[in-house]
Structures are given as structure tokens and as C-alpha cells.
Amino acid sequence: NDTATGASSSACNNIMSVNYSAKLPSGTSARTVQAWIKPSDAGCRYFMGYGTNSLTDGSFSVGNCGNSIIVRLINEDHSFFSPRSLFDGHWHLVTVTDSYAASTGNKITAYVDGQNLGTEVSNPLQTPANTGLTIGSTPSDCCYYGGVADAAIYPTALSATQISALLTAAGNGVPTAPGGVTATPSANTAVVKWTASTAPRATVTNYIVTAMLGSKAEQSISTTALTATLHSLPAGSY
């Protein structure tokens, strides 16, 4: 893989463009784009990318827009929503993998801090060979506001296990699931309680409680407490 050191910027004067001697993944070759990011605003900005704008699906750029990870291919953009805030003053590991097979098409999968945000299918990529990697922007855009560190391109689509291992190696990890979860129902109401989650080198400060009626999310509550009350729930089995 090719890696680059960290950078931080609050204006359009701190962009790094590097032409690596090693070839970056091109054409429909598998790849993983990864970096630690610490956004300084919630705007839609790209923090790294390479390729060209002169070809359809000739670019591969990754950024964040609010709580979503965005991938630009040129003439085709993809977005992956993250349930956790990216603009929270903390560093987050963003990973985007890409793989192509004639039978399944081109598949793009996004992760935040090891959590799989889903997979989308795109047209086959046409990323040209021997193009430089831009960090803190894309080859045609300005600019990323915030920090970017340990940017890397891997010539393979990393597995979820490999991504989790990289997160752990950095001294971080996915929080444990809340324990002792109980739900006490009453008329159109449910009181949910649990014990705290834990995470390496951090304190879990926020929880999201969602009432699921079958496959439909009826209501969600964000809380810093270890209990939540959901009101006005339709009748049914949750």
C-alpha cells in the first residue's frame, strides 16, 4: 500500500498532491482508500482522491458530507449514511473498498470506525494508470477543512476483519454492545434500559434507541443516559 503523513487545514492552502512511483490501482482493479479524518465543519468535502475528470467513472475520490461518506467517480456519486456523528471533534477511520466482477458488477463498500455502512453497485471504473494522489482535496476540487492522517491506498478490497484489525492496531476499537437491555411496555409506550458500553481509549457518551416494528423503524431517540422512553408507538410487536 502507499501511505502519506497527516495534514490539517482550515483554508485552501494546505493541500498535498503526490505522484507516487508505485502504481495506484487503475481500471477495474480492486482497491481500498482509507484515512483518519477529523472534520472541522459538516460541509460536503473530499479528503483524498485520484484519477481524472476527463473519463466517465475515471476518478475515485472519498469525502464526507454531514454524517455520510461520499464517493465520487465522475458522472456517478454514491453516499453512505453513518449513524454516528463525524463532526464531533474526534478522529474517525474512514475506509472505502471497491471490487469488480463481471457477474456482480462494481461494488463499493464504506466503513466508519470499522462499522459497515453498506454496499452500492456502480458502473465499472475507468481510473487511469499513473495518476497522482491528492490528499486534502481531489484532483479537481478545493478543499478539505479539518485533519487527514495516515492516508493509504491498498491494491485490494480489505475485508471487514482486516479493517477491524487496523482499527485495533491503532489503539481503537468498536464499542461493546450495551448490556442488560430491558424494555418495559405500557400503552403505546416503551421504557428501555441498559448498562453502559465500553470502548478502548474512550468513553461512550451517546446511545441511539430505535423501535422496530417488523423491518420498519417507527421511532429513534438519541440519549446520553442509560434509559430512554419511546412514546406514541403504534400497536404491534416490537
Image (tube, rainbow, N blue to C red):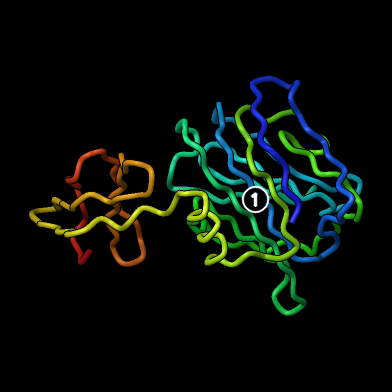
Q: Position of residue 3 (x, y in %)?
A: 72, 48
In which quadrant of the rendered view does residue 139 lie?
top right
Q: Is residue 59 visible?
A: yes
**Left or right relative to 102: residue 108:** left
**Residue 58, above or below 119:** above
Q: How would you rate the neighbour count of disc 1 (Cα within 10 Å): few for under 14, some for 14-19, many for 20 or more?
A: many
Which residue appears at 28% of the width and 62% of the height? 213
Find residue 132 and report its horizontal and vertical position in percent: 86, 44
Residue furthest toward the left? 186
What is the total number of numbered labels drawn onto the structure image? 1
Amino acid type of disc 1?
Gln
Q: Quadrant of residue 158?
A: bottom right
Q: How far from the left and from the top, in percent, is residue 143?
A: 72, 28
Seen as rendered, the residue at the extreme bottom is: 103
Location of residue 18 in the rendering, given as x and y in whole percent from the top left corner: 83, 39
**Where the C terminus falls, by quadrant?**
bottom left
User: Can you say whether 102 is above or below 187 in the image?
Assistant: below
Which sits in the foreground, 137 or 158?
A: 158
In the image, 197 versus 2, the foreground residue is: 2
Q: Is residue 231 visible?
A: no
* Quarter that holds the N terminus: bottom right
The one nearer the camera, 98 or 157, is: 157
Taking the spot 55% from the left edge, 34% from the top edge, the residue there is: 38
- Which residue appears at 15% of the width and 51% of the height? 193
Relative side of 134 to 197, left or right: right
Residue under numbered circle 1: 34
| Front-most of residues 16 and 39 | 16
Q: Secondary structure at mark 1?
A: strand
